[in-house]
Image (cartoon, rainbow, N blue to C red):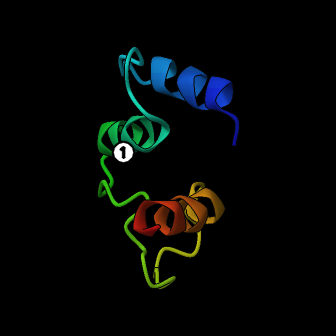
């Protein structure tokens, strides 16, 4: 998902978007939605949240954080 789209989602939830990385921004969205702030923590590619909107981006971001 593109950063502008993520910022739009964040703003609709009342999350301030300035100076946050994509990872931090999505984690703040997760918190605002009442979910765990787990984005980019599936370092081994394991996640039981099959319906998560962020799932594909999560795995990609997790790999980048490791390297």
| Relative height, residue 8 to residue 46 (above, below) | above
Q: Spot the residue most to the front.
A: 67
**30 or 19, nearer to the observer:** 19
Rendering coords of residue 26 (x, y %): 44, 42
Image-quadrant location for residue 43: bottom left
Image-quadrant location for residue 36: bottom left
Residue located at (42% from left, 69% from top): 66
Rendering coords of residue 28 (x, y %): 33, 37
Residue located at (55% from left, 23% from top): 7
Name the secondary structure under disc 1.
Answer: helix
| Relative height, residue 44 to residue 33 (above, below) | below
Residue located at (60% from left, 55% from top): 53
Image-quadrant location for residue 1: top right
| Relative height, residue 59 to residue 8 (above, below) | below
Rendering coords of residue 9 (x, y %): 55, 28
What residue is shown with label 1?
Answer: 27
Q: Is residue 1 left or right of residue 24?
A: right
Categorize mark 1 by other alpha carbons within 10 Å: few (<14), some (14-19), many (20+): some
Counting labels gives 1
Q: Is residue 36 left or right of residue 4?
A: left
Residue located at (42% from left, 74% from top): 42
Q: Is residue 33 left or right of residue 45?
A: left
Rendering coords of residue 48 (x, y %): 46, 82
Q: Is residue 51 left or right of residue 15?
A: right
């Amino acid at each position: 998902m593109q950063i502008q789209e993520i910022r739009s989602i964040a703003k609709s939830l009342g999350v301030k978007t300035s100076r946050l990385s994509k990872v931090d921004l999505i984690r703040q969205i997760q918190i605002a939605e009442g979910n765990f702030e787990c984005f980019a923590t599936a370092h081994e590619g394991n996640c039981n949240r099959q319906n998560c909107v962020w799932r594909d981006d999560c795995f990609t971001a997790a790999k980048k954080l490791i390297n």
